[in-house]
Image: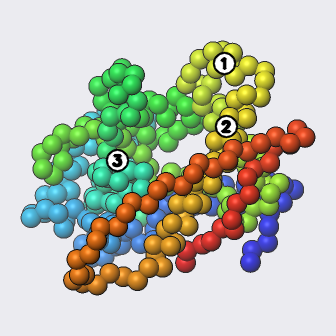
Amino acid sequence: MSPAVTASEGDGVTDAAADRAESQALGRALRRRFARTDDSGTRIVGDPPLVVPVRDLFDDDTGVERLAALLTGYVESLAPDRRVLLGAYRPVDFARKVVGIGSVGTRCWMVLLLGRGDPADPLFLQIKEAGPSVLEEHSGPAPVDHHGRRVVEGQRLMQAVSDVLLGWMRAPGLHGRVRDYYVRQLRDMKGSLDLDRVHQDGLLVYSELCAWTLAWAHARSGDRIAIASYLGSGTAFDDAVAEFAAAYADRTERDHDALVHDLSRPAPADDPAPGPVAEPVPPSPPARPAVRRGGTRRAPARAARRRVV
């Protein structure tokens, strides 16, 4: 078992996380064999269905040229100094990439670029489809008619420092439908802590850093005076968020228990015999909110966590 990380060790942990983040943009991508160099040049390594190179999607050898021509709109979305930076690279390969849970059903591509003066200097970009905001149903259409641009401008507004190559583009897909996309570096210096090793005090420090980061984002993107007035000087908002967090954690654990239970069931037969339709399982009762006793918040008791291997 890894030793716990205490608050006094926080500086060392964050420094290590920063060091890891610096190497992730290129080092981890190469270590995972995103690219390989042979007599034909440097190309993206296929790992279907997660990564499918463009050469396996087109019937001819024009896929890279056709997709590279679509990057013009992305280049125009960058600031002049960023265009100069990107101009030092040339696209040599594309691949369709499966995205994470939060982006299931959207198109995503990865691009491999090589330095014009140094072919051993690779740069990976990620092109992700951007759809309508879920808020449009309630607040109306966004002020810009490009969903990729909306995402990019929102990130630039909320983040103190965004990806230097963050931009947007509009292009037709393989079947001709025009879609909006935003572009960023693949694994662009993101870092995090190993929460399995963080001591309770260290977790509190980490939570406070996340909370301040979120608060700064709201202050940069919204009316900070109106937000401060709404929150007031009391603890009503703090209490509501804490109660929601405790209830959400309990809901997550119940969902995980249900998943473990389903995984333990035997696999169904190839041709199961017809039988009665199972009755729907009634929903679990809502979790009891956290309560104050003697001025101290105490979250509801939870069952021990189980991990699926």
Give x and y (percent) for residue 189: 56, 52
Frontmost residue, 86 versus 100: 100
According to the picture, the residue beneath numbered tag 1 turns out to be: 230
Frontmost residue, 220 versus 141: 141
Residue 200 appearing in the image: yes
Vertical position of residue 303 compared to residue 72: above or below: below
Q: Is residue 180 left or right of residue 136?
A: left
Q: Amino acid at mark 2?
A: Val
Indicate the quadrant containing the C terminus: top left, top right, bottom left or bottom right.
bottom right
According to the picture, the residue beneath numbered tag 2 turns out to be: 241
According to the picture, the residue beneath numbered tag 3 turns out to be: 128
- Asked whether the beta carbons under mark 3 and mark 2 sit within 8 Å of each other, the answer is no
* Residue at point 38%, 57% (across, down): 99
Furthest-right residue in view?
294
Sequence order check, earlier mark of 1 and 2? 1
Q: Is residue 60 left or right of residue 213?
A: left
Q: Quadrant of residue 23?
A: bottom right
Q: Quadrant of residue 97?
A: bottom left
Sequence order check, earlier mark of 3 and 1? 3
Q: Amino acid at mark 3?
A: Lys
Determine whether the residue tagged by mark 3 lies in a helix, strand or loop. strand
Judge depth for marks 3 and 2 and give the one in front: 2
Q: Is residue 49 left or right of residue 28?
A: left
* Residue at point 60%, 60% (across, down): 253
